[in-house]
Image (cartoon, helix red, strand yellow):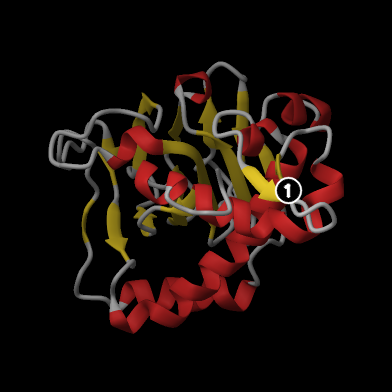
Amino acid sequence: MTAEDIVTNFIEIYDNALDADICHQIIEKFETSDKIVRGRTGQGVDLNKKDSYDLTITGLYEWRNLHSLVVTNTFAYLKQYLRKYIFALVGAISPGILDPISGKVVTLTHENFAQYEALWMDETIQKIYRPSWINVQKYIKGMGGYHHWHSEIYPHPREADDEPLRRVLFFQYYLNTVNEGGETEFFYQNLKVKPQQGRLAIAPAGFTHTHKGNVPFSEDKYILTSWIIFEKAEKIYGQKKLL
């Protein structure tokens, strides 16, 4: 699988996206947490499908600084991703923005995006999208893994607002290097992404990018992962600058 194949598959890999020191801090803080639980799928704990130890850091006071750092860092790479795949930003929602010269509302499109990017890209992304809850996960060498082929969009049996149905992308930071095994394997793309410390993968959340996490054999595997989701409709369409 070549770099060109990865591009056309909408799977973007960013090496050295997270500093090694930050990766170590996250792992060390994870290991001392008393809030770690067994990994769950939408149907609950099932080790035949997912064998991991998970910690949701969103909303935890002691994680607030690292959480903020990860969100800010991810936003920079999300911007790169959306510049490349612009219709993820201007296709479904068709945002309206204010032209600073004419004072008129214009529709942001792939054709005029370069003209308005500097003024409106950040705000447009933040009105349409947000990160979901952020999880740190550990997979024990020789046994851990997300064994089940899965995608990320589905009606959740225990969430009233069905947030998983609003997932558009998922992102995953590899917090340590695994020399043997532990790849994120994409079924239809015939692609394996090796765990390399600081590496970030961003991919579509739908069934076209069905994937699994292979068993790590040489080291335990640590990742930080979440989703980019649509904001609720009332926030998107309730803003005066996005019509």
User: What is the quadrant of residue 51 in the picture?
Assistant: top left
Q: Residue furthest top?
A: 188
Q: Residue 118 at x, y = what percent?
A: 80, 59
Q: Residue 21 at x, y = what percent?
A: 60, 78
Q: Nearer the viewer, residue 234 or 125?
A: 234
The correct choice, above or below, for 39 with respect to 175 in the image is above
Q: Residue at x 35, y 31 (%)?
A: 147
Give the crowd class for mark 1: few <14, some 14-19, many >=20 residues within 10 Å: few
User: What is the quadrant of residue 91 in the picture?
Assistant: top right
What amino acid is at disc 1? Lys
- Specify whether 114 is left or right of 168: right
Q: Residue 61 at x, y = what percent?
A: 30, 82
For the image shown, how many numbered marks are present on the structure?
1
Element at label 1: loop
The correct choice, above or below, for 3 with respect to 32 in the image is above
Q: On the image, numbered disc 1 is attached to which residue?
A: 104
Q: In which quarter of the image is the C terminus?
A: top right
Q: In which quarter of the image is the N terminus?
A: top right
Q: Nearer the viewer, residue 94 or 67?
A: 94
Q: Residue 204 at x, y = what percent?
A: 54, 32
The correct choice, above or below, for 17 with respect to 41 in the image is below
Q: Residue at x 30, y 62 (%)?
A: 56
Q: Which residue is drawn at 32% across and 42% down?
A: 143
**Is there any visible trace of residue 39 in the rendered image?**
yes
